[in-house]
Amino acid sequence: VTFLKRKHGLMKKAYELSVLCDCQVALLISEPNNKLSQYASHDMAELMQRFKQVRKRSRHDNPIAFELMMAFFLDTFVAHWAR
Protein backbone atom coordinates (compact mmCIF):
# COMPACT_ATOMS: atom_id res chain seq x y z
CA VAL A 1 0.00 0.00 0.00
CA THR A 2 2.81 2.41 0.86
CA PHE A 3 4.47 1.94 -2.54
CA LEU A 4 1.24 2.67 -4.40
CA LYS A 5 0.55 5.79 -2.34
CA ARG A 6 4.07 7.10 -2.91
CA LYS A 7 3.90 6.28 -6.63
CA HIS A 8 0.64 8.18 -7.03
CA GLY A 9 2.02 11.07 -4.99
CA LEU A 10 5.11 11.23 -7.19
CA MET A 11 2.97 11.19 -10.34
CA LYS A 12 0.82 13.98 -8.90
CA LYS A 13 3.95 16.06 -8.20
CA ALA A 14 5.20 15.43 -11.74
CA TYR A 15 1.86 16.64 -13.10
CA GLU A 16 1.93 19.72 -10.88
CA LEU A 17 5.48 20.52 -11.95
CA SER A 18 4.50 20.35 -15.62
CA VAL A 19 1.46 22.59 -15.12
CA LEU A 20 2.86 25.15 -12.68
CA CYS A 21 6.26 25.53 -14.36
CA ASP A 22 5.09 25.03 -17.95
CA CYS A 23 7.68 22.31 -18.57
CA GLN A 24 7.69 18.87 -20.10
CA VAL A 25 7.99 16.02 -17.61
CA ALA A 26 8.60 12.32 -18.14
CA LEU A 27 8.53 10.00 -15.15
CA LEU A 28 9.46 6.31 -15.25
CA ILE A 29 9.02 4.03 -12.26
CA SER A 30 10.46 0.54 -12.18
CA GLU A 31 8.32 -1.37 -9.71
CA PRO A 32 9.49 -4.28 -7.52
CA ASN A 33 7.57 -6.76 -9.70
CA ASN A 34 9.50 -5.57 -12.82
CA LYS A 35 6.49 -3.60 -14.06
CA LEU A 36 7.15 -0.15 -15.49
CA SER A 37 4.83 2.76 -14.81
CA GLN A 38 5.03 6.05 -16.62
CA TYR A 39 3.74 9.59 -16.62
CA ALA A 40 4.39 12.06 -19.40
CA SER A 41 3.08 15.59 -19.67
CA HIS A 42 3.57 15.39 -23.45
CA ASP A 43 4.34 12.61 -25.91
CA MET A 44 6.57 10.10 -24.09
CA ALA A 45 8.35 8.97 -27.26
CA GLU A 46 9.25 12.57 -28.13
CA LEU A 47 10.53 13.26 -24.62
CA MET A 48 12.62 10.07 -24.67
CA GLN A 49 14.09 11.04 -28.03
CA ARG A 50 15.06 14.47 -26.66
CA PHE A 51 16.58 12.80 -23.60
CA LYS A 52 18.63 10.47 -25.81
CA GLN A 53 19.96 13.45 -27.80
CA VAL A 54 20.98 15.26 -24.61
CA ARG A 55 22.47 12.01 -23.35
CA LYS A 56 24.72 11.74 -26.40
CA ARG A 57 25.95 15.32 -25.99
CA SER A 58 26.41 14.99 -22.22
CA ARG A 59 28.60 11.91 -22.53
CA HIS A 60 31.29 14.07 -24.06
CA ASP A 61 31.00 16.84 -21.45
CA ASN A 62 30.92 14.82 -18.24
CA PRO A 63 30.62 11.08 -18.89
CA ILE A 64 30.81 9.85 -15.29
CA ALA A 65 28.19 12.21 -13.87
CA PHE A 66 25.88 11.59 -16.76
CA GLU A 67 26.07 7.82 -16.53
CA LEU A 68 24.94 8.08 -12.93
CA MET A 69 21.83 9.82 -14.24
CA MET A 70 18.86 7.69 -15.32
CA ALA A 71 20.61 5.84 -18.15
CA PHE A 72 19.58 2.47 -16.74
CA PHE A 73 15.93 3.45 -16.59
CA LEU A 74 15.98 4.90 -20.08
CA ASP A 75 17.51 1.74 -21.54
CA THR A 76 15.06 -0.43 -19.61
CA PHE A 77 12.11 1.68 -20.70
CA VAL A 78 13.09 1.71 -24.37
CA ALA A 79 13.73 -2.05 -24.38
CA HIS A 80 10.42 -2.74 -22.64
CA TRP A 81 8.21 -0.46 -24.75
CA ALA A 82 9.93 -1.11 -28.09
CA ARG A 83 8.56 -4.67 -28.17
Image (cartoon, rainbow, N blue to C red):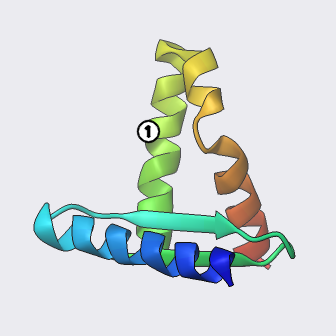
Q: Is residue 59 at all visible to an observer of this figure?
A: yes
State the residue in front, 61 or 40: 40
Where residue 65 appears, as percent x and y from the top left, is: 56, 21
Q: Residue at x 35, y 64 (%)?
A: 25
45 vs 41, left or right, is: right
72 vs 47, left or right, is: right
Q: Residue at x 51, y 15 (%)?
A: 62
State the residue in front, 15 or 40: 15
Q: Is residue 82 at all visible to an observer of this figure?
A: no
Q: Looking at the image, which residue sits at the far front?
A: 2
Q: Name the amino acid type tagged 1.
A: Val
State the residue in front, 7 or 24: 7
Q: Quadrant of the C terminus?
A: bottom right
Q: Image height check: is 28 above or below 71? A: below
Where residue 19 appears, as percent x and y from the top left, is: 17, 73
Q: Image height check: is 14 above or below 49? A: below
Q: Looking at the image, which residue sits at the far right?
A: 33
Q: Residues within 10 Å of mark 1 (few under 14, many from 20)?
A: few
Q: Residue at x 58, y 36 (%)?
A: 69
Question: In which image quadrant can residue 31 be found?
Answer: bottom right
Where residue 22 appears, as percent x and y from the top left, is: 13, 65
Residue of label 1: 54
Per the image, label 1 sits on a secondary structure element best described as helix
28 vs 53, left or right, is: right
Question: In which image quadrant can residue 54 be found?
Answer: top left
Q: Number of labelled discs?
A: 1
9 vs 37, left or right, is: left
Q: Residue at x 13, y 61 (%)?
A: 21
